[in-house]
Amino acid sequence: MSEDIHHEEWRPRHGPWPVAVGVMLATFMQVLDTSIATVALPHIAGSLSATTDQATWVLTSYMVANAIILPMTGWLGNHFGRKRVFIACIGMFTAASALCGASLDLPMLVLARVLQGAGGGAMVPIAQAILLESFPPQKRGVAMAAFAQAVVVAPIIGPTLGGWITDNYSWRWIFYINLPVGIVAMLLAEWLVEDPPYIQRNLKAAIDVIGFGLLALWLGTLQIMLDKGQEEDWLGSIWIRWLIAISIGAMIAFIVRELRVEHPLVDLRIFRNRNFAVGVTLMTIIGAILYGTTAELPLFLQTLMGYSALQSGYAMSPRGVAAFVVTFIVGRLVGKIRSRWLLCFGFAVLAASAFLLSDINLQVSMATVVWPTVLNGVAVSFIFVPLTTTTMSQLSQRQIGGATGLYNLMLNIGGSSGIAFVTTLIARHSQEHQALMVGHLALANPVFNARLAAAQHALAREADPVTALHQAYAMFYNLLDAQAHLWAFVDTFRIFSLLALCGVPLIFLFKRSRRPLAGAAAQVH
């Protein structure tokens, strides 16, 4: 009993804020790379003589490798030592970034991205575990506020920064900029990070090779299926059906394996903790909404409003600014206001922001888009900090390393699902709305006939009557297509609003912490 108390009261030799700066530098770099390459894909494809579809493997390969390593974080830390793994991950990520920038062809770049994703996979959960352990229980809300700056803000500014670098320099510099940051992060980690006494290197616990194979098969097929599903028409494609079957089978086999093996790769028994199970579910929902809207809004601005990649990034930037400012305020509110009410407010504002975004049309100004995105940033800040502290509130420090890996894995899976949902819904609903509206363009409609004749007459000044008629039809069809896609975007934002409201009842499943680990920072009652 005294040993457990000693473990609970352990604090690092350095103050919590220097440790936070050291680990967050690496975390920000890693999270930024999940989104910074998205706007550079056309440039990468052109530079490496590949198609845009082939270039998407630059994103997919990173996400697959990242997802496979995430749940292994606890085992890696216990087997090799958390500090050693953290520094090795930073080094691997930095070296792989150099390879990405120097890639001569697409296969080389994809391989380098796999190494980069594998190196970055453990960095975020390890950094989160270090922050939770470095701060006293009553200050953990502030610690998670600092952590949220990377997890929430970096994916938002990534496309803007990537677009600016690509437009003004070269796509290779979106990877080269990681080199000085990575070197500084390694030096700070060597100086500031230390392993707590309960992290005991257990070299006898050999890696569960079968479990690792099942994990890689499950998450690899899942990520590829989510990324390529819409492109291949989902269940209309036989190989997508095979991926779904393999992913489900591997997931079931992995769960059974990990519950039976003596030294599991991933401790799934942690899901017996109700707060952790509820928190992971809510984080998956947040991941879907956050990444889904981050993918959907620039798509609307660029395809329907004619914005450039950089302009759409500017329209999204206020969300990052709002999240950056409000997160520190929320970090101080955690412990003073019940986390339950902070979460309810956050989910309500998130639903309101998505609903406001559904009130769009083809004549909206940038301000109409900016204000809902600012609310979105405020909402995510009110959710992320109390959600993380409450989710981890009833776990022992021994469990935090593995728990943060699973927590961030579900954030990534939720994000991948949200992006897949957006691309599918926009494609399918635009077809549905087009089929419903095309009847208005029938020749039997006198209004359409009058508009068509007027358009043909105007265009006949520059072309012969037959060509003018074809141009008039094309003009009306393009307008119909734009309206159909607009309604598809409206539908998707409304569904995200409803999804946010669905998270509210789950908040009341959290139970009040009885342990000093949570302290005042995570009481939900």
Image (spheres, rainbow, N blue to C red):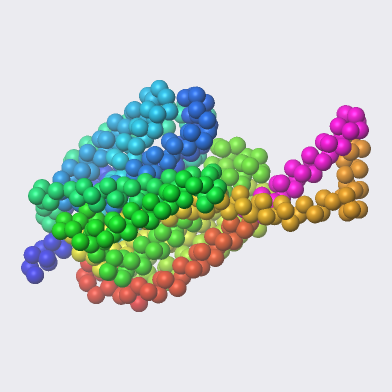
Q: Residue furthest top?
A: 104
Where is residue 109, by image quadrant?
top left
Q: Is residue 471 magenta?
A: yes
Task: Look at the magenta stretch and give its main secondary structure.
Answer: helix
Residue beneath the point at 67% across and 55% down:
432
Give the camera-side residue of 330 and 161.
Answer: 161
Screen quadrant of the C terminus:
bottom left
The residue lying furthest to the front in this view is 238
Q: State the residue at coordinates (27%, 35%).
A: 92
Residue 55: image x %, image y %? 48, 33
The spot of residue 325 in percent (x, y) is: 44, 53
**Side (left or right) of 86 relative to 388:** left
Range of the magenta residues?
460-489
Residue 514 image position (x, y, % from top left): 24, 75
Which residue is drawn at the image coordinates 46% and 70% (left, top)? 504
In the depicted structure, whether residue 454 falls above or below residue 97: below
299 horizontally vs 347: left or right: right
In the rendered image, residue 261 lying in the magenta stretch gets the answer no
In this rendering, position of residue 163 left or right of residue 151: right
| Residue at 12% from the left image edge and 66% from the top image edge | 5
* Above-or-below relation of 348 to 43: below
Q: Is residue 339 visible?
A: yes
